[in-house]
Image (cartoon, helix red, strand yellow):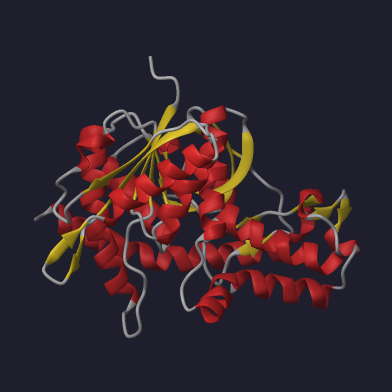
Amino acid sequence: MKLRKLVSVVGAGNVGEHTASLLALRGLVDVRMFDLPKKDGDRLIEPVKGKALDIQQMLSALNIDGKVEGYTVSPEGEGYEALEGSDIVVITAGFPRRPGMSREDLLSKNISILWVISEKIKKHAQEAIVIVVTNPVDLMTYAVYRILGFEKNRVMGMAGVLDSARFKTFISKEVRVSPLDIHAYVVGGHGDEMVPLISISNVGGIPLKDMLPREKIQELIRRTQFGGGEIVDLMGTSAYHAPAASIVEMVEAIVTDNKRILPCSVYLDGEVAQYYEAQGLCAGVPVKLGNDGVEEVIKLPMTEEERHMWRRSVESLRKNLSTVEELLNARSSL
C-alpha cells in the first residue's frame, strides 16, 4: 500500500524545480521530476537527475522524510514510464514567448510539446489528476483536456491562485494588514484581462471598496493584471517562486481532501457555463478542490461592471480557441 501520494512534475525549469522542492519540503508527497537532457559541448548532461538528488539531500539535511527522483526524457516521448502510479501530474514544460514570436507560433510549439506529454499521461497515468501551468494557461488547459479525454474534474490550470496571491500582496502593502486577513478572488483569463472581483474582496470582513478610494483600487488592479510583466522587467525572467507556491496550494488541497475553494482554470459546460457565459472553454473560476480534483464550480456573484470585464476576458479567450482547435485537428491528422 502506498503511504504517500505521488506527484510527477513534468518540466524541471525554474517553476518545476521550485514546485518539486516545495512539495518535498511539505513532506506530504513523493515527487518525480521529468525533463530533457542538455548539451555541454560534446557531453550530454542530465540536470533533472542532479536537481532531484540535490533536493533529496536537502531533505536529509532538514530531517524530512521523502523521496525525490529525476528522470531524463526525450522530445519524442521516451522515458515517461515512471509516470506510472502518479496521483497528480503537474505540467510546467513549454516554450516561453520570445521576441518576434507570434501568439500562433507560441501556441503551435506548446501544443506540440503538450501533445507528447499528454499521450504519455494517457498511457502511464490514466487515473491521475492533471494540473497545467504552461502558458497561455487557459488555452493550454483546454488543449490538454481535449487531448487526454479525461473527465473535466481531473484537468485544471494554475493561474487564479497566483493572480489572487499577487492581488492580496498589493492590497496588503497598501492597507498594511497581513495577507492572512485579506480575501480576494481574481477570475477570468490569465492575462491582461483577468478580473479581480472587488465586490467580494475584503480585509478582515471590511469591504475593500470601503477601505480604499476607487482610484487606488484601480491602480492595484492594473498592477495585478501586469504583475508577471513587472517581475520580468525586474528580474529579466518570469516569476517562479510564487507560481510554484500556487501549484503547491492546489496539490495540497487535492492530496489532503480539505475542500479548499481556489480559483483555477477549468472546462466549463452545463449550468455553470451558462451562468458564466463561457460554454465550451477553460477559464479561471473558483472551484472546490478535493481528492477527486474539481468537486464543484462555485458561482460567484458579480456586479454589472465585473460582469462586463468578465465577458471581455471570455471573449478574448474564445478568439484564440479556434486557433487551438485548428492546431489540435492538424496534429491529430498526422
Q: Residue at x 58, y 49 (%)?
A: 285
Q: Which quadrant of the structure image shows residue 45?
A: bottom left
Please name the residue shown 49% across and 66% down the image. 315
Classify 85 as above or below 119.
above
For the image shown, how many numbered marks are present on the structure? 0
Left or right, residue 264 beside residue 209? left
**Quarter in which the C terminus is drawn:** bottom left
The picture quadrant where one finds residue 81 is top left
Quick check: can you spot residue 102? yes
The x and y percentages for residue 214 are 83, 73
The reply to whether residue 284 is visible in this rendering is no
Picture layout, residue 331 above or below residue 129? below
Seen in the picture, residue 144 relative to 259 is either above or below; the reply is below
In percent of width and height, residue 29 lies at 46, 32
**Residue 24 position within the rendered picture, expressed as x and y whole percent measured from the top left:** 48, 40
Quarter of the figure that contains the N terminus: top left
Residue in front for this viewpoint, 200 or 82: 82
User: Based on the displayed image, in which of its 4 quarters is residue 11 positioned?
Assistant: bottom left
Which residue lies most toward the front here?
61
> In the current view of this chain or complex, which residue is farthest to the top?
1
Above or below, 331 against 273 in this view is: below
**For this rendering, which residue is in front, 222 or 55?**
55
- Farthest residue, direction left: 334
